Image (cartoon, rainbow, N blue to C red):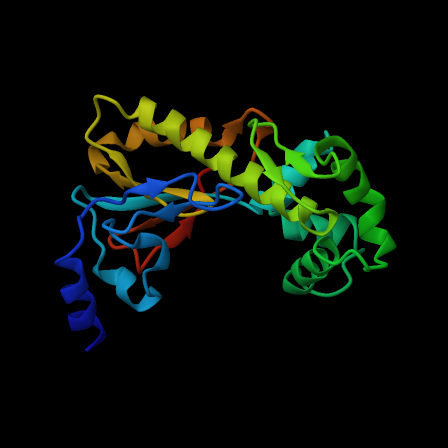
Amino acid sequence: KKVRSFSKKLNKKTCSVLYNPFGTKTGRLTVQKRSFPILTLDRGLRKYIEPTNDVFVELDINGAEIRTMLALLDKPQPQVDIHDWNLRNLYNNAGTREEAKKRFFAWLYNDNSDDKVTTRFYSKDQIKERFWNGTHINTPFHRSIESDEYHSINYVLQSTSNDVCLEQACKVSKLLEGMRSRVAFMMHDSVVLDYDAKEQKQLEEIISTFQNTRFGAYKINVSIGRDFGNMRKISWK
């Protein structure tokens, strides 16, 4: 029933994904009305999305907003999972990775948090001082966004993270010119490639291109699947 209902809706839409990088206040991606609705597609329907080549390859920025915060604080990028890194280096292995993740975001978006351990390494005050002028946040990508103090951290991290991913996806798209492989679509912190298996040797260069941002090398999670609903993570180094 769900598939039939979705299929009827597709009759009014294009098979292309048409993004609007200015559809939200921070620039977080939305799709246009006649676009294929990849960003809001029910997870149960993802298995029906198949590549025209051999496989989908998804390049996903590991902990995008945390890595953006590290970058804006001029701190190095750990080349391991950022939540595992926080667990070991900030929280003294107290708890699990998932608990470390929850602890970090509970601190990040709560101005009343008294988590001194996290504050000693990640300075929200420094971010505000550098990017919020009292009425607007001004990002490294020259977006000026009206903001009160409460939303300033969220806006600068979300907007900058999104623009980093867009910039890297454009680099990958340029690299793929002349190849059969292509960019199929983007999610918020990742780019999904419709990949030709005969071009396997070029994959490492493509990953490296996506990884090397204006803020340094981000850790990238790589997943491969024959449809978008069945992607498995792989180790590429």
Report the side of 165 relative to 39 (left or right).
right
Q: Is residue 51 above or below residue 95?
A: above
User: Could you tell me which residue is drawn at 17 percent across and 48 percent down?
Assistant: 14
Q: Is residue 102 above or below residue 68?
A: below
Residue 27 in sight in this render:
yes
Q: Which quarter of the figure has residue 134?
A: top right
Pinpoint residue 15: horizontal percent, then vertical percent.
18, 48
Nearer to us in this view, 137 or 237: 137
Nearer to us in this view, 173 or 151: 151
Q: Which quarter of the figure has residue 122?
A: top right
Pinpoint residue 44: horizontal percent, then vertical percent.
30, 68
Pinpoint residue 176: horizontal percent, then vertical percent.
28, 26
Q: Is residue 45 above or below residue 181?
A: below
Report the side of 189 relative to 202 (left or right).
right
How many numbered marks does the figure carry? 0
Q: Is residue 191 above or below residue 115?
A: above
User: Could you tell me which residue is drawn at 38 percent across and 54 percent down?
Assistant: 232
Residue 123 in sight in this render:
no
Pinpoint residue 33: horizontal percent, then vertical percent.
27, 51
User: Could you tell me which residue is drawn at 72 percent across and 50 percent down?
Assistant: 86
Quarter of the figure that contains the N terminus:
bottom left
Nearer to us in this view, 118 or 203: 118
User: Could you tell me which residue is drawn at 77 percent across and 48 percent down?
Assistant: 89
Nearer to us in this view, 163 or 191: 163
